[in-house]
Image (cartoon, rainbow, N blue to C red):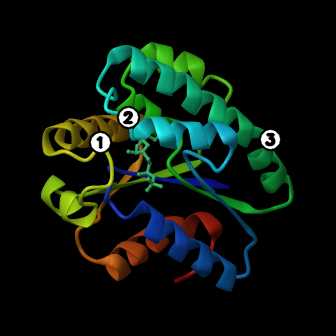
């Protein structure tokens, strides 16, 4: 199974991925954890670019979209290998982030035509104010107007693609519990 957590910056994906992995391991599962951008050379370049002041330019975002798609292609084989070893793949973001952040509809879908699509995506949704408090001053994407737009796009995509949407305002433990409640029936286990 390939599980992805999506959400705006500050929604708590990284924390939840860590906790989710620990829980899956205690339940006896083998896991493979991913985070996009990855730790590959392409991922490193992306992280550098994300700090650039040109980030709002269209061509800059298109370049980022190409790099994110390339970064994901590096992951494709790794995900396949992990799955064939019986591991549960858990991912902090996936190509849905490009749909929402790089925002060039059909072109982004085309670019990501060959990447692995999660079996289960959970959107951690929260108010922008809370998100901003959590990630103050990290990078250019973190401003109110921009994040409002991103949040709306996520909610629309969630409807179109059938993601689970969780309220991520209620603290780490409650959110983790809600994530477990979604995943456990798919694995046939009780929490
Ligand atoms: P983020 O999850 O914030 O990573 P970290 O906490 O390690 O900095 O991701 C970095 C940024 O990358 C985030 O602002 C969203 C952006 N992003 C895109 O614009 N497109 C994508 O396809 C992905 C995966 C991320």
Mark carried by residue 140: 1
Q: On the image, numbered disc 2 is attached to which residue?
A: 52
Q: Disc 1 beta carbon < 8 A from ligand 1?
A: no
**Could you give the CA–CA distance between mark 1 and mark 2, rounded to whole angstroms?**
8 Å
Indicate the quadrant where residue 54 lies.
top left
Q: Is residue 90 above or below residue 23?
A: above
Describe residue 87's horizontal placement relative to residue 100 as left or right.
right
Q: Residue at x 45, y 18 (%)?
A: 62
**Disc 3 + disc 2, Cβ < 8 Å:** no
Q: In terms of depth relative to the viewer, which is nearer, 59 or 2? A: 59
* Residue 179 appears in the picture as rendered: yes
Quadrant of the image for the N terminus?
A: bottom right
Horizontal side of 103 relative to 43 (left or right) equals left
Tag 3 residue: 77
Query: Residue 123 placed where, x, y %?
Result: 38, 52
First in sequence: mark 1 or mark 2? 2
Q: Reply above or below: 109 against 169.
A: above
Secondary element at image label 2: loop
Q: Position of residue 29 (x, y in %)?
A: 73, 74
């Amino acid at each position: 199974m390939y599980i992805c957590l999506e959400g705006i910056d500050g929604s708590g994906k990284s924390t939840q991925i860590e906790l989710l992995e620990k829980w899956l391991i205690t339940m006896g599962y083998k896991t493979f954890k991913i985070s996009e951008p990855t730790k590959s050379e392409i991922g490193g370049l992306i992280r550098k670019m994300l700090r650039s002041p040109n980030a709002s330019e269209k061509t800059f975002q298109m370049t980022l979209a190409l790099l994110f798609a390339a970064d994901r292609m590096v992951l494709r084989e790794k995900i396949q290998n992990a799955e064939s070893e019986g591991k549960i793949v858990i991912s902090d973001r996936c190509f849905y982030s490009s749909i929402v952040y790089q925002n060039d509809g059909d072109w982004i879908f085309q670019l990501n035509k060959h990447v692995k699509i999660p079996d289960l995506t959970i959107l951690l949704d929260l108010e922008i104010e809370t998100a901003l408090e959590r990630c103050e001053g990290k990078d250019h994407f973190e401003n109110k107007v921009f994040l409002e737009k991103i949040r709306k796009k996520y909610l629309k995509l969630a409807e179109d693609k059938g993601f689970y949407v969780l309220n991520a305002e209620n603290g780490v433990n409650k959110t983790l519990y809600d994530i477990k409640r979604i995943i456990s029936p798919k694995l046939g286990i009780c929490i």
